[in-house]
Image (cartoon, rainbow, N blue to C red):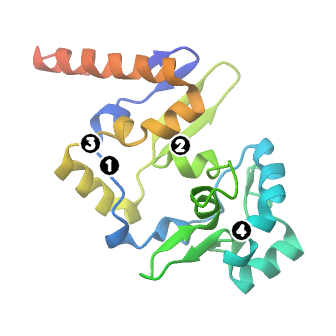
Amino acid sequence: MILIDDTILSFDLFDEKFVCDLASCKGICCIEGDSGAPLDWTEIDILEEILPQIWDDLSPASQNLIKKQGVFYLDQEDEPVTSIVNGRECVFTYTDGQGICKCAIEKAFREGKTDFYKPISCHLYPVRLQKNKEFTAVNVHKWIVCECARVQGKNLGVPVYKFLKEPLIRKFGAEWYNQVEITAVELAKAKQSGHKF
């Protein structure tokens, strides 16, 4: 593990390769899983505020669920997550003309309708954050539905930390990310010299 400020980074951040391959996976991460996407409590108010900007892109099933349940619920650990339709599909999912599941929140952002990109947990995937009193662990989550992204990442030689540059800066700041890049260089040098981690 690597310590930067109050974060603990997994070596997987540097060793694992990852580049989303939507043509292959069709955005299945938005419709699979045991629960909705993790939310910060501060994001709930934002999601409720931007609903009018994304409402028309949501499916009737999503609209009905939001009317009944709201934009979130509490998972088994009493943490807020996005509401999901039929125990699977995120309520903020829509399908584009190519049959790819995408995020209506991100669509609204790209169209200039909102300045909120999407929940940080979605933006950061495959990284998952785990907080305790002193530190935030920055780990790489391995999900079988993202195997094509790992294959494409290996083919392109893109480590997770590079693929996630934008969301990592969004979450932790540019100076923190600079430290990650410096760490990556040092780790590469250490490996070339035969050091094992």
In the rendered image, which residue does mark 3 sit on?
158
Front position among marks 2 and 1: 1
Query: How far is the residue under mark 3 from the one under mark 1?
Result: 6 Å
Give how far apart the Cα atoms at labels 4 and 2 are: 26 Å
Instruction: Name which of mark 1 and mark 4 comes first in the sequence.
Output: 1
Residue in the picture at 37% in, 43% down: 163
Q: For the residue marked with disc 3, what is the amino acid?
A: Val
Q: What residue type is labelled 2?
A: Arg
The alpha-carbon separation of the residues under discs 1 and 4 comes to 29 Å
SS under mark 3: loop
- Side of 155 relative to 72 (left or right): left
The residue indicated by pointer 1 is 18
The residue that appears at 74% across and 57% down in the rendered structure is 75
User: Which amino acid type corresponds to the residue marked 1 in the rendered image?
Assistant: Phe
| Res. 34 image quadrant | bottom right
Name the residue tied to disc 2: 128
Per the image, label 1 sits on a secondary structure element best described as loop
Q: Residue furthest right?
A: 68
Q: Are marks 3 and 2 in contact (CB under 8 Å)?
A: no
Of labels 4 and 2, earlier in sequence is 4
Quarter of the figure that contains the C terminus: top left
Assess whether mark 1 and mark 3 are in contact (beta carbons under 8 angstroms).
Answer: yes
Neighbourhood count class around disc 3 (C-alpha, 10 Å): few under 14, some 14–19, many 20 upward: some
Q: Give the percent coordinates (x, y) of residue 109.
A: 62, 56
Residue at mark 4 to residue at mark 3: CA–CA distance: 32 Å
Decide if residue 191 is on the left or right side of residue 56: left
Residue 125: horizontal and vertical position, in percent?
Answer: 49, 49
